[in-house]
Amino acid sequence: MCLHGGQATPPAPNPRVLVMGMPTALITTPWVVAGCPGVPPPVPPCVTGQWVMGTLRVTSMGQPLVVQSGAAVTAPGGVTLLPVSMQTRVQAM
């Protein structure tokens, strides 16, 4: 979620790598942010989020994966995305 409380989701999960039966996400895919109030005014609401740091050694289709220790920023606001719901069974570098 963004710092304002908007929910971020990947529009195209990566079906090539599954973790606990669920698809992973590549950092190259922009995430959609819904329900961002853009608080305090005049801050614009977050519309998309882009992961800028993910796995270093584990890749899928040559691209890094999203991990809890990664980093993402939103547009147009430029705030951080906070991972709040992730699987914890697999760890990657």
Image (cartoon, rainbow, N blue to C red):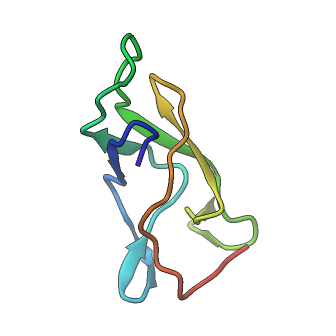
- Residue 18 placement (x, y as % from top left): 43, 82
- Find residue 55 and report its image quarter: bottom right
Q: Residue at x 55, y 53 (%)?
A: 27
Whether residue 56 sits left or right of residue 28 in the image: it is right
* As drawn, 4 above or below 60: above
* As drawn, 76 above or below 90: above
- Please state which of residues 82 and 75 is positioned toward the viewer in this rendering: 82
- Residue 15 placement (x, y as % from top left): 38, 73
Q: Which residue is drawn at 53% across and 33% down?
A: 79
* As drawn, 62 above or below 44: below
- Residue 44 placement (x, y as % from top left): 37, 18
Whether residue 40 sits left or right of residue 73 in the image: it is left
- Find residue 63 and report its image quarter: bottom right
- Please state which of residues 9 and 16 is positioned toward the viewer in this rendering: 9
- Find residue 56 and report its image quarter: bottom right
- Residue 76 placement (x, y as % from top left): 45, 22
Taking the view exactly as shown, the residue that stands out farthest to the top is 42
Q: Which residue is drawn at 51% across and 51% down?
A: 82
Quarter of the C terminus within the rendering: bottom right
Taking the view exactly as shown, the residue that stands out farthest to the left is 35
Count the labels in the image.
Answer: 0
